[in-house]
Amino acid sequence: MIPVPVKYIKKNNEIQIPENINYKENQALGSEAYKITVNANGAFVEYSDHRGKIWADQTLKSITKNGKISECEIYDYPKYHHRGLNFDVSRHFFSVEEVKKVLDMMSMLKMNVLHWHLSDDQGFRIESFKYPDLQKESIDYYTQEQIRDIVNYAEERGIEVVPEIDMPGHTRAILAARPDLSCTKRKLKPGKDAGIYKRIFCAGNEAVYTFIEELFDEILPLFKSNRFHIGGDEAPKAMWKTCPLCNAKLKELSLNNMQELQGYFGGRVTDILKKHGKRPIMWNDALVGNKVSKDAQIQYWTPSYNRQTVEFAKAGGEWIFSDMHEVYLDYPYSMTGLKKMYEMVMDFADEGGFESYPPIGMEACLWTERVDSDEKLEERLLPRLFALAELSWSGRVSTYEEFEERCKEEAERFSQIGYTVKDQAWWNPKGEEAKLEAEAFMKSMSTGCIEEDPEEMANWEEEQAEEGKNNYAADQKYKERFLSMWGSDPSDGQL
Ligand SMILES: [Zn+2]
């Protein structure tokens, strides 16, 4: 079973699964907890809350075989209360049916947060009546009715939907509809390629804040979560540096540099969210501006800003573990294999302190630049999501070998109900073919900048150095990971 319950005593005799299960609410069990007793008298469930009841049902389902169930006693509760999946529907769009299929998958694994990445350079996926050009430029999108339906569907399965509209960077799809909101005001199309785009929201133009306010007025009520992800990652400042409005704002606020202007931008958006009673989440790049409110939650994806993340955590800030080297599921199995994932290193890369300042949870990230079909999507998730689900619910409770045996059973169960699971031969791929795949992937990542702005990459490197980016920790971690898998250092030779 995945994830393994905290306590599970299984007896040898089986009974027919009773038609009626006896449910009893018991809030004293604690958040998301449940107890199951199966004996000759029937099946008895105690649950603490809405989610506890759903998780109990999922457990009952997974231990029922051919209508029979072993007598047992189970007591179960999660290690972390944020067990998430970031699902990017901007780079490639996925249907309502597929989103629901992913939600079903998550619920079976007792995962409780769908971080829905709805806006990026390549597409804005929310219907807006106020700004219909947004969906016109992006073509594929979810209607407001579909979004409400998905939020309800998720809630019925114990899952909170946390939407993300990434800003001020990764906004090219929005700027395609509203070119007046960028520094240059040039008319563009949404992006096609993977990478980092230079054109971002202008932080000095008040019309940008008005747009965000009006857009939020319209779309925030679609979501029930009290959290909202505003991105804040990978925002090149090249355009801000030459923009009269951005420079005027810098002067008006007596800020030292454009990183602090991004801090100001994040603060303004945070204030808009607060009016709606929502709490912001941001990627850990956003910490560079030193203005992140303590109410915000930080999602740690890049060790490049590990030091800033540790400082935030030390000051009592809440953070989510999403280290790209450990839980990015757009990476091929040759980069992040199942064993690697189950044995992942949870730390701050060089900075220590993880045990003293633990995260509120863990979240896998499924970016979809290179994922263009439902089958590919499911293969990237299964079985690797099993590892994330177990580590975030139970912790690492077994050896990899034992975990892999359980993965095989779960893979069978998920395949039977129509999921595409990665072929077992590729769970931990070895050999030249796999090594070439890993190298090619790393190469495609490192040349990830944009067709029409060839000068951009140099600029970006320079800026990150200015921001105090800790390249050493990031590079070191990536080299060690590659070395341990392939016995070679990717910085040698071509890479
Ligand atoms: Zn500007």
Image (tube, rainbow, N blue to C red):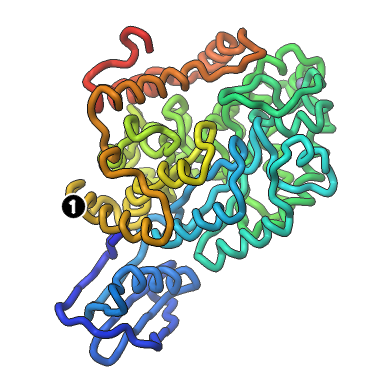
Residue in front for this viewpoint, 418 or 248: 418
**Is residue 292 visible to us here?**
no
Vertical side of 36 occupied by 187: above or below:
above
The spot of residue 241 in percent (x, y) is 71, 14
Quadrant of image for the C terminus: top left
- Above/below status of 4 relative to 88: below
The answer to whether residue 399 is above or below residue 48 is above
Judge by depth and name the residue closer to the eye, 295 or 45: 45
Rendered location of residue 486, percent (x, y): 24, 23
Q: Is residue 451 above or below residue 334?
A: above
Kindly give the residue lying farthest to the left in the view shown: 12
Residue at left offset 38%, top offset 87%: 19
User: Counting other residues with Cα less than 10 Å from the Cα at mark 1, is it few (<14), some (14-19), or many (20 or more)?
Assistant: few
Q: Secondary structure at mark 1?
A: helix
Task: Tell me where residue 320 appears, x and y as whole percent.
Answer: 46, 44
Image quarter for residue 154?
bottom right
